[in-house]
Image: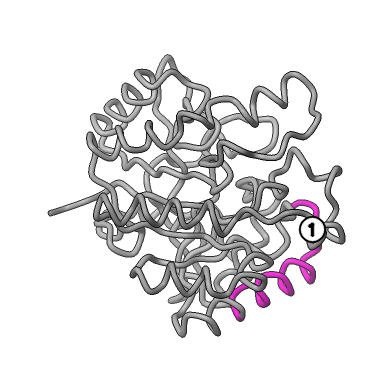
Amino acid sequence: MIVNNVLSFDIEDWFHPEVFDSRFPMETWSKLESRVQKNTELILNFLSKKKLKATFFFLGWVAEKCPELVSSVAADDHEIGSHGYSHTRINRLSSSQFKKELKLSIEILSSITGRKVKGFRAPTFSVMTDTLWVLPLLCEFGINYDSSVYPTYHDRYGIPSAPQNPFIIYKNGKDFIIEFPMSTVEFLKFNFPFGGGGYFRLYPLWLSIWFMRMCQKQNRPIIFYAHPWEFDNNNPEVELSLFNRYRHYYGINKFLDRLNRITDLFSFTSFERSNLWENVDSLHIFKK
């Protein structure tokens, strides 16, 4: 069966999201309660019951602390990619800092699984116009594809002019990187994001399904993403502004049921098992 839709999970703990960036600096992480193992195991159980394969983008810090979790994901034959090491947005790192973090995350994951790390997803989708300098570095470390670009406007990320279908984002001689952009649909001359995470929690379910069906009609893949903490009904409560509290916590209690619904309606698999590799635009937006 040809499957173009991808199920992906960014494996990070509850204190890693951007909204907590100033609240929980890295030196405090080891002192906080870790919930990533339990929540990721919940995802693995769900995928096993549904007989689905997915791509897991592991934060290097999490993989280092929980190598047995990485092994469990690999043992279930899911794809493993890099989500960086420290969950720092690329635009807050120098080239040398990013290179160091990327190298470390790849080494950790490869040493645990014995597999080549082919895919990368930047923390907070921070491959943007001003961070395209990371692409040659991804290529240098053997990354074959990226899934970080959101072709939309957002207060934290996005390249609104980026193609909505898979395309070659970087090329240098025979080396290139394929971009699998996050899901958007064109409606009223605007690219509406809907690919998972907060969008999936905040939108009414019928709207998410409608966007997914429209995406399919526009001959574009659904690239779905989620985080382990979005499956945790007992997330630690942290004081946030009303807006951030709504954006971060709303809909978590319904996330698993909603995921169950859409995986009944649409076929999903991992990036490496998908048919997307056969339909890549030759256009690239950055060249060395």
- x and y percentages locating residue 242 in the rendered image: 75, 19
Type of residue at label 1?
Trp
Quarter where residue 62 is shown: bottom right
In this view, 206 is above or below 125:
above
Quarter where residue 65 is shown: bottom right
Q: Nearer the viewer, residue 194 or 238?
A: 238
Q: Which residue is most to the left?
A: 1
- Label 1: which secondary element: helix
Q: Which residues are magenta?
A: 90-107
Colouring chosen for the image of the structure: one colour
- x and y percentages locating residue 194 in the rendered image: 45, 30
Residue at 27%, 27% in the rendered image: 213
Q: Which residue is most to the top?
A: 188
Residue at 41%, 72% in the rendered image: 74
Query: Magenta stretch containing residue 172, yes or no?
Result: no
Q: Is residue 97 left or right of residue 248?
A: right
- x and y percentages locating residue 73 in the rendered image: 43, 67
Q: 10 Å neighbourhood of mark 1: few (<14), some, or many (≥20)?
A: some
Quarter where residue 11 is shown: bottom right
In this view, 158 is above or below 59:
above
- The secondary structure making up most of the magenta span is helix
- x and y percentages locating residue 188 in the rendered image: 42, 14
Q: Which residue is mark 1?
A: 29
Q: Is residue 210 left or right of residue 82?
A: left
Q: Nearer the viewer, residue 174 or 211?
A: 211
In this view, 176 is above or below 50:
below
Q: Nearer the viewer, residue 137 or 14?
A: 14
Residue at 48%, 52% in the rendered image: 9
Query: Magenta stretch containing residue 95, yes or no?
Result: yes
Q: Quadrant of the C terminus?
A: bottom right
Q: How many marks?
A: 1
Q: Quadrant of the N terminus?
A: bottom left
